[in-house]
Image (spheres, grey):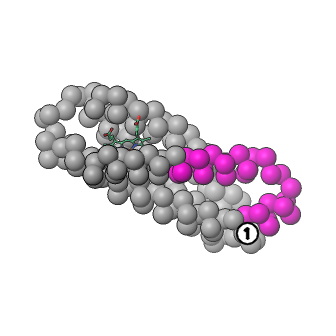
Amino acid sequence: MYEWILYTHMVGAATWIGGSMLLFVLGITLRDKAAQQVVYFYIGPLYGYFEAAVLVVLLVTGSYLYISNGFHSNPEKFTYELGFYMHIKIALVVLITIATVLHMIISLKANGREKSFKEKIIGRGTSLLIFILNFVILWLAMQVRTIL
Ligand code: HEM
């Protein structure tokens, strides 16, 4: 059971990170305004709901892995280093989840029309934050796995 949940967690991580990398690169390279409006209008909501579902899968499977390892009920079993990497990872996952929710609200609200200045700042800021956090979370996950 544990192995399958870990496998699902890793498929989720690959899908989540791959998806956000692609959209980030698309956002930087697709400069034509008219093309941007059409592309985002059609793929934006689909991509948003898809990624949100994958994030839920990561949160649920991650919580299972966490509890199964006894992080929750048996903390003294673990070294300071392991607890440190694990809990920084969880804190950053909370941050990435907040950034994702904010990004989704702004993007869905403005879908099909020009974004206001404030919406642009929040939209771009959250997508940059998600992009950077993904690399850090992946590195932390690797450290946790290596110690476990
Ligand atoms: C954006 C969200 C997340 C991403 C991208 C992610 C990514 C990953 C990856 C790639 C691994 C495997 C690392 C390796 O094999 O080297 C992993 C393992 C793990 N993750 Fe996550 N994770 C996320 C959220 C969470 C959450 C929310 C929790 C806990 C509440 C969690 C708990 C764990 C645990 C305990 C392991 C180690 C399992 C083992 O090695 O047996 N993850 N994660």
Task: Name the residue located 73 percent from the left edge and 69 percent from the top edge.
Answer: 41
Q: What is the magenta segment's predominant secondary structure?
A: helix
Locate residue 137, reporting x and y percent. 45, 39
Other residues around mark 1 within 10 Å, as few (<14) / some (14–19) / many (≥20): some
Q: Report the side of 118 relative to 81 (left or right).
A: right
Three-letter code, disc 1 = Phe
Residue 66 locus on image (x, y percent): 27, 46
The residue pinned by badge 1 equals 41
Question: Does 31 appear in magenta?
Answer: yes
Where does the C terminus fall, quadrant-wise? top left
Look at the image and tell me whether residue 101 can be seen.
Answer: no
In this rendering, position of residue 6 left or right of residue 45? left
Q: Is residue 102 above or below residue 9?
A: below
- Write the residue at 18% across / 43% down: 70
Q: Which residues are magenta?
A: 15-41
Quadrant position of residue 112: bottom right
What percent of the width, then of the height, locates residue 52?
50, 62
Residue 120 forms part of the magenta stretch: no
On screen, residue 111 versus residue 129, left or right, reads right
Assign ligand 1 to one image quadrant: top left
Q: Residue at x 32, y 38 (%)?
A: 86
